[in-house]
Amino acid sequence: MATVDKMPMLQEGYDKLVAELKRLKIERPLIVDAIEEARAHGDLSENAEYHAAKEQQGQNEATIADIEGKLSRAQIIDPRELSGDRVVFGATVTLLDEDDKPIKYQIVGETEADVSRGRISYNSPIGRALIGRKVDEEVEVSVPAGDRYYLVSQIEFI
């Protein structure tokens, strides 16, 4: 029997998925109405509106199934309840790059990652490299642009 992997996420990410699922479920009857209206136009083989509405319905249902799957596997983690001296999911890590410029990242779930907000996935190359590291440890990250080196300068649980 296959095991179902838990999907770690912050409460904010979980709430965002719930809101998206609610929005998609509200769209369902609207898409069905669009299909019915397009069907009333006659010949379905050359009815672009009908085919577009059916495609939209398929995409909507696939997205609903994907989100429901993620929510069913969700493991909500509150970083404020964590502690320790190692980088773990939910930790906020301050790194120093090769020029001693500080960079701050929070390790989050795949659905919550947003580099512009300083949030990186635990599955990203830098996220994987950081997990388990301690303050003052050097980290080497291989990215498409080449290898990058960082020093872990601070670990916070905020």
Image: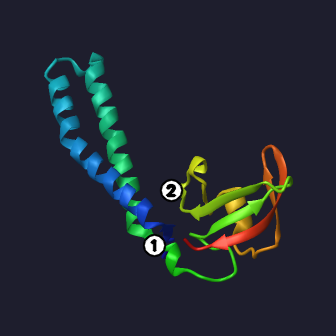
Q: Is residue 74 left or right of residue 27?
A: right
Q: Nearer the viewer, residue 81 or 129?
A: 81
| Residue type (three-letter) at the residue carrying disc 2 | Glu
Q: Quadrant of the C terminus?
A: bottom right
Q: Is residue 145 left or right of residue 84?
A: right
Question: Is residue 2 at least partly visible in the picture?
Answer: no
Residue lying farthest to the bottom in this orientation: 84
Q: Residues within 10 Å of mark 2 (few under 14, many from 20)?
A: some
| Image point (50%, 55%), residue name | 111
Q: Which residue is mark 2?
A: 112
Q: Residues within 10 Å of mark 1 (few under 14, many from 20)?
A: some
Q: Position of residue 23 (x, y in %)?
A: 28, 47
Residue lying farthest to the left in this orientation: 40
Q: Relative to 57, say whether 100 is above or below.
A: below
Q: Position of residue 48 (x, y in %)?
A: 30, 19
Q: Is residue 4 left or right of residue 142?
A: left
Tag 1 secondary structure: strand
| Separation of residues labelled 2 and 1 (CA atoms) | 13 Å
Q: Position of residue 46 (x, y in %)?
A: 29, 16
Q: Is residue 12 left or right of residue 106?
A: left
Q: Which residue is mark 1?
A: 75
Question: Is residue 111 at least partly visible in the picture?
Answer: yes
The image quarter containing residue 39 is: top left
Q: Position of residue 30 (x, y in %)?
A: 19, 37
| Image point (63%, 74%), residue name | 88
| Residue type (three-letter) at the residue carrying disc 1 | Gln
Q: Nearer the viewer, residue 32 or 101?
A: 101
Tag 2 secondary structure: helix
Q: Nearer the viewer, residue 57 or 78?
A: 78
